[in-house]
Image (cartoon, rainbow, N blue to C red):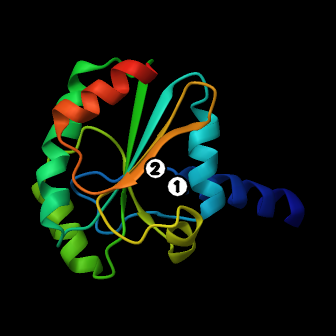
């Protein structure tokens, strides 16, 4: 009986782990490298855009409205956008996230995720094609028009 209860608890926790932030949330789920890669694998057949950002990053703040607009325009069967905060300050992070009307899930990156993707500057975007291969990975402000052009070629 204890094994079954433990198994059910693990299943319940794994479901909570991938639940995206809501505007009422007080904390974000923190993703490990394995969990980020699982998010990509779970969406194979779709283009996946990972957007790494922080609440204190002005270029990130300029980029996010374009991501929200793209999410509105491109069908979710074709494109999945996942926001991943790299903030250290949980209070500032949550305050910023509550101030934006995100239309895609947002998580927090564990420190190991930064190493996995070799992130040394933000914003940082990674685009996976429908087969699950990285087709774009770079830091710096990605203007909406540029991103739309990249996505048009990948989708």
Residue visible at 46% across and 49% down in the picture? 19
Q: According to the image, label 2 marks what residue?
A: 19
Image location of residue 6, percent across then percent down: 79, 64
State whether residue 65 is above or below residue 132: below
Displayed quadrant of residue 81: top left
Residue visible at 30% across and 20% down in the picture? 74
Image location of residue 153, percent across then percent down: 40, 20
- Left/right placement of residue 94 relative to residue 120 reads left
Are discs 2 and 1 less than 8 Å apart at CB? yes
Find numbered disc 2 in the image and state the secondary structure of the residue it sits on: loop
Looking at the figure, which quarter contains the N terminus?
Answer: bottom right
State whether residue 152 is above or below residue 133: above
Q: According to the image, label 1 marks what residue?
A: 16
Spatial distance from mark 2 to mark 1, Cα to Cα? Answer: 5 Å
Residue visible at 36% across and 70% down in the picture? 86
Looking at the figure, which quarter contains the C terminus?
Answer: top left
Find numbered disc 1 in the image and state the secondary structure of the residue it sits on: helix
Displayed quadrant of residue 112: bottom right
- Left/right placement of residue 121 relative to residue 73 reads right
* Camera sees residue 71: no
């Amino acid at each position: 009986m204890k094994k079954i209860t433990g198994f059910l608890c693990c299943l319940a926790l794994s479901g909570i782990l991938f639940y995206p932030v809501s505007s009422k949330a007080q904390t974000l789920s923190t993703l490990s490298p394995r969990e980020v890669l699982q998010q990509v694998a779970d969406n194979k057949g779709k283009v996946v855009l990972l957007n790494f950002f922080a609440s204190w990053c002005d270029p990130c703040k300029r980029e996010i409205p374009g991501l929200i607009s793209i999410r509105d325009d491109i069908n979710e069967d074709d494109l999945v956008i996942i926001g991943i905060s790299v903030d250290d300050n949980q209070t500032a992070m949550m305050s910023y996230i509550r101030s934006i009307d995100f239309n895609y899930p947002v998580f927090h990156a564990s420190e190991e995720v930064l190493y996995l993707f070799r992130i040394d500057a933000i914003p940082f975007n990674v685009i996976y094609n429908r087969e699950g291969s990285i087709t774009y990975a770079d830091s710096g402000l990605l203007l909406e028009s540029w991103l739309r052009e990249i996505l048009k070629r990948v989708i």
